[in-house]
């Protein structure tokens, strides 16, 4: 008797999905719209709705969105990657140092070193989790600290300028037919990530591994390989985010990415990915990331004091998370 | 950082050439001479020209703290005086990427003047470029983006006298321990221009002016929460320490806790920036010998004033300096007023 060909969960028909009490997964879209409308009205004379400002929000959230894509894969497989912030820093610095060392081949050196560092961190995390069966929370907590220290010592805390115009144009400061490169990167990463996650057997394997690893193994899915792969993806995405940061700031510094972990996790969870695995949404993560960027932007333009900005932001995220996750316990 | 090294060298050179105290010791990052902040004042004509014009300002800070609150208070009061609306206030949390985002967002609100502390010369150069191109008047606190030109790119740098702060800390500690002995040096182990300059100034002054005092222990700190354990280790290895310099008041709390834990009432501490718990210990005759503070309110006032002068197309000095002041148990109330423009905390006044 042959084993079932794939462990892909059957997607219910559109009608079935809508008629089921599954509306909580759309909360992030409703929330996004509600917050957007609120600011559009209250800040209509304060510059919120200008094209420049709306594009700024996408530029500002691009690195977080890209990291969120990687985290969706990791969480959906039942793992977590806390080291993404540190990975951003080492990748940015590695790329900048490589570009300074090989100015004639700056683009290749920068991309190679930057993504290489991201993949290296992902390899370390993935190998420890997948083959030594160590819990990913603890492993990535440790590598978070380890690589933060590496980032600090790489240049003894100094910032490195990134001046190659092709690199900075491609990775954060340039335009293609008038569209900022960061916008293009966001769209491309989300599109490719979503396609792989939703439309390929690999994506189905990731979800199956997170949902029930034993069952997945029984059906023939190579669970350790899936686990390793999601860390490679998460690391690579963090590496890409590092390149984008250094292109946008035209410099690399050990503090890059330091504060992003919680924002990425919030974006991913609010967007509908479950912390325990088995369910995820790339589009939801994108909208979650944009929603938080929009929140930051709007609260600043409202002229709130810094303390009030933090309080209001926390309250809104609390409400969004409570509403979107309330249903999952049923 | 090239700029910091240049500034440090310039400051050191200036010190050695001009032993007399005063502004002659402090020069700007490109060798500019210092203008006292008291020289930067908005005249009545200036106020009249600014009022009713609907001008807007933004305060883009690097962190939140008592110090920043006082600087903001000085700036806000001066802007209010001139009828300028402060539309945006942000805190970058020491994150260069967030500072870039804050600048972009703030520009959407259309400010005419921006006051900010650039996090580091390299990353802030690109970050502020858009503001420069939008013709916004930029006034920088203590730090300068790399290769920015006075007049075209920014209106002025305003700073506390970073060198004097470190130097006066050395003087206070030296006096407290009788001019001789062994001291510990707890410095800020991060790439942050303000603390780096002040820490270096303390060390240089001890090494140059006080031959009978030696720094026997050095410890870098980046997370203030770890101060107590680092200080305990230092005291364990150097039980005869006469004094300790602590880079700023928040870690000083932890150092005090370490001393109390060891039952040590002899070792003297000096630190920078006013803080209630540290001042309380000082007033009660504890380990704290003195606190060196800057005139934070005055810094904010001067920043706003120079930004508005630039808005009126007036010539502005490149490098404006506000004085440092030494606060001991004797002048605690005056110190708080002069630095932060408010009363010292009740607990401190009551303990006097």
Image: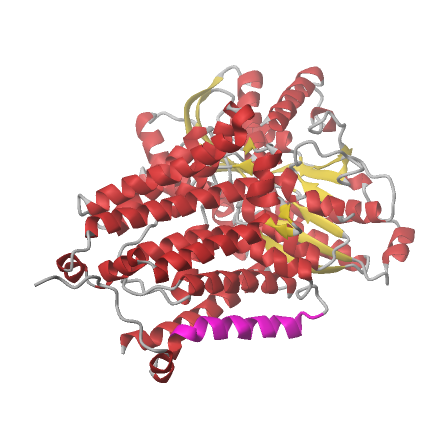
Horizontal placement of B298 versus A206: left or right? right
| Residue A203 image position (x, y, % from top left) | 31, 58
Q: Which residues are magenta?
A: A25-44
- Judge by depth and name the residue closer to the eye, A47 or A179: A179
- Residue B272 in magenta stretch: no
Q: Is residue A120 above or below residue B53?
A: above
The outermost residue toward the right is: B45
Give how far across and how far down residue A43 sits, in percent: 67, 69
Image position, residue A266 (x, y; %): 41, 61
Residue visible at 90% across and 57% down in the picture = B48
The secondary structure that most of the magenta stretch takes on is: helix
- The answer to whether residue B290 is above or below residue A76 is above
Q: Is residue A28 magenta?
A: yes
Q: Is residue A267 left or right of residue A171?
A: left
Q: Look at the picture and state if A265 lies above or below B135.
A: below
Q: Residue shown at 34%/25% (left/top)?
A: B238
- Image quadrant holding the N terminus of chain B, namely top right
């Amino acid at each position: 008797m042959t084993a079932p060909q794939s462990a892909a969960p059957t997607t219910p028909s559109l009608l079935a999905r809508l008629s089921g009490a599954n509306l909580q997964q759309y909360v992030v879209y409703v929330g996004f719209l509600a917050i957007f409308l609120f600011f559009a009205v209250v800040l209509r004379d304060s510059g919120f709705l200008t094209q420049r400002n709306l594009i700024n929000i996408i530029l500002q959230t691009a690195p977080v969105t890209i990291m969120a894509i990687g985290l969706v894969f990791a969480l959906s497989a039942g793992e977590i990657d806390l080291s993404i912030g540190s990975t951003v820093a080492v990748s940015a610095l590695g790329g900048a140092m490589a570009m300074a060392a090989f100015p004639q081949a700056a683009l290749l050196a920068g991309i190679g070193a930057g993504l290489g560092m991201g993949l290296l961190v992902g390899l370390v995390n993935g190998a420890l989790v997948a083959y030594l069966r160590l819990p990913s929370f603890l492993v990535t907590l440790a590598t978070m600290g380890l690589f933060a220290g590496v980032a600090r010592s790489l240049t003894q805390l100094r910032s490195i300028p990134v001046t190659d115009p092709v690199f900075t144009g491609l990775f954060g400061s340039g335009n293609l037919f008038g569209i900022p490169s960061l916008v293009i990167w966001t769209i491309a990463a989300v599109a490719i990530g979503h396609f792989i996650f939703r439309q390929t057997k690999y994506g189905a394997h990731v979800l199956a591994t997170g949902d029930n690893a034993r069952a997945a193994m029984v059906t023939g899915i190579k669970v350790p390989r899936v686990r390793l792969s999601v860390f490679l993806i998460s690391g690579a995405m963090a590496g890409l985010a590092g390149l984008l940061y250094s292109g946008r700031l035209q410099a690399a510094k050990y503090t890059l990415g330091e504060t992003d972990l919680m924002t990425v996790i919030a974006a991913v969870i609010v967007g509908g990915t479950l912390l325990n695995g088995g369910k995820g949404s790339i589009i939801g993560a994108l909208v979650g990331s944009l929603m938080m960027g929009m929140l930051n932007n709007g609260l600043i333009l409202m002229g709130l004091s810094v303390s009030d900005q933090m309080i209001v932001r926390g309250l809104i995220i609390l409400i969004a998370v409570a509403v979107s996750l309330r249903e999952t316990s049923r | 950082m090239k700029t910091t090294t240049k500034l440090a060298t310039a400051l050191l050179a200036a010190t050695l050439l001009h032993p007399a105290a005063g502004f002659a010791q402090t020069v700007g990052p490109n060798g500019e001479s210092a203008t006292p902040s008291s020289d930067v004042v908005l005249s009545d004509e200036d106020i009249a020209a600014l009022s009713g014009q609907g001008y807007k300002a933004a305060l883009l800070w690097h962190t939140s703290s008592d110090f920043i609150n006082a600087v903001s208070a000085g700036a806000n009061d001066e802007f209010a005086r001139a009828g300028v609306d402060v539309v945006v206030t942000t805190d970058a949390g020491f994150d260069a990427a967030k500072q870039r985002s804050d600048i972009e967002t703030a520009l959407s609100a259309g400010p005419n003047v921006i006051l900010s502390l650039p996090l580091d010369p390299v990353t802030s150069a690109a970050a502020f470029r858009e503001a420069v191109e939008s013709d916004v008047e930029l006034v920088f606190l203590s730090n300068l983006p790399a290769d920015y030109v006075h007049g075209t790119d920014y209106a002025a740098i305003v700073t506390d006298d970073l060198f004097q702060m470190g130097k006066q800390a050395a003087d206070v500690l030296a006096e407290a321990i009788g001019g001789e002995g062994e001291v510990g040096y707890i410095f800020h182990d991060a790439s942050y221009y303000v603390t780096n300059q002040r820490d270096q100034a303390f060390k240089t002054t001890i090494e140059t002016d006080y031959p009978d005092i030696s720094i026997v222990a050095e410890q870098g700190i980046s997370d203030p929460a770890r101060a107590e354990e680092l200080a305990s280790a230092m005291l364990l290895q150097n039980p005869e320490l006469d004094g300790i310099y602590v880079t700023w008041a928040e870690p000083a709390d932890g150092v005090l806790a370490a001393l109390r834990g060891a039952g040590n009432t002899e070792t003297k501490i000096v630190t920078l920036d006013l803080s209630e718990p540290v001042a309380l210990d000082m007033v009660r005759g504890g380990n704290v010998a003195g606190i060196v503070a800057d005139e934070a309110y005055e810094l904010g006032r001067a920043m706003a004033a120079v930004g508005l002068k630039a808005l009126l197309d007036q010539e502005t000095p490149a490098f404006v300096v506000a004085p440092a002041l030494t606060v001991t148990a004797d002048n605690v109330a005056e110190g708080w007023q002069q630095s932060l423009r408010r009363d010292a905390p009740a607990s401190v006044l009551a303990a006097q």
